[in-house]
Image (cartoon, rainbow, N blue to C red):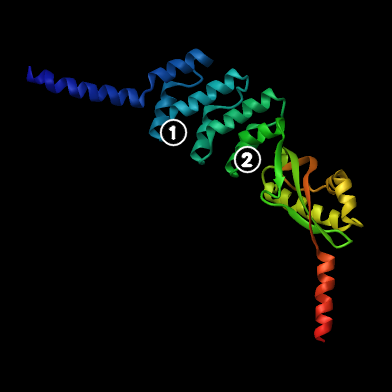
Amino acid sequence: MQGIFFTIPIFLIVLVLFLYFVPLGLWIQSGVSIGWGKIGMIKLVIMRIRKIPPKLIADGVINLHRAGLDFVTSEELETHFLASGNVANVVNALIAADKANIELDYKTATAIDLAGRDVQEAVQTSVYPKVIDCPRDGKVAAVAKDGIELKAKARVTVRTNIDQLVGGATDDTIIARVGQGIVSAIGSSENYKIVLENPDEISRTVLSKGLDSGTAYAILSIDIADVDVGKNVGADLETDQAEADKKV
């Protein structure tokens, strides 16, 4: 009788360890979903030994194969996981790109992910452009030729350029370039009233400069969201100069 009490716990421990290293449920799910032999039992056990989550890899392969992307193997997903990549993001990005008819191969997707970019968000932004506030906080200040200061805020609509995502400049560069373009355009205006009456002209001028060159985005539009009149910088300078002349 005592032997039974010792045997049952040992059996349960062995059973738990067996089910941990040999995920039968996952193997059956894979076989039913994409066919037997695609993800073998031994392969799942090896994943567990290598500290690779079998469910993560199996789910990735199943989802890709169901989407018709059967060129991606479990070995490739394992390699990406071991390289500290986000397997789920890559899988979702590949499926989303395929549904949206966007060219994105596995090598490019993993390269984008390992570069620290959100490849899933990149695909979504390729389909649904996003808006970047320029600047993020406050407004860009510039002075027209008549000495009147104007403060402007722009909204830049961009679409991700996947081919330029690795190594391409990001949001901060777009914001800096657009801000510089606004300052230049306002500074070239004869007087502040022209800007207030035709803010679209500033948008067209800035957009024509090709500010998205070398960045991870293609600029679709630049809209001046708000323009405020600031100080009369020209008058202030004249006053300061007059005060300086008096002292001399």
Residue 191, visible in the rendered structure? yes
Quadrant of the rendered image containing residue 126: top right
Residue 246 versus residue 234: which sits nearer the camera? Answer: 246
Q: Residue at x 76, y 57 (%)?
A: 141
Quadrant of the rendered image containing residue 73: top right
Residue 42 versus residue 112: which sits nearer the camera? Answer: 112
Q: Residue at x 66, y 50 (%)?
A: 137
For disc 2, the marked residue is 112
Between discs 1 and 2, the one toward the N terminus: 1
Q: Residue furthest right?
A: 190
Quadrant of the rendered image containing residue 88: top right
Q: Residue furthest top?
A: 32
Residue 35, visible in the rendered structure? no
Image position, residue 238 (x, y; %): 85, 72
Residue type of the residue flagged with mark 1: Ile
Q: Secondary structure at mark 1?
A: loop
Q: Secondary structure at mark 2?
A: helix
Q: 10 Å neighbourhood of mark 1: few (<14), some, or many (≥20)?
A: some
Q: Is residue 1 left or right of residue 123?
A: left
Image position, residue 52 (x, y; %): 44, 33
Q: Is residue 8 left or right of residue 83?
A: left
Front tag of 1 and 2: 2
Q: Is residue 185 left or right of residue 216?
A: right
For disc 1, the marked residue is 52
Residue 214 versus residue 28: which sits nearer the camera? Answer: 214
Q: Residue at x 81, y 65 (%)?
A: 233
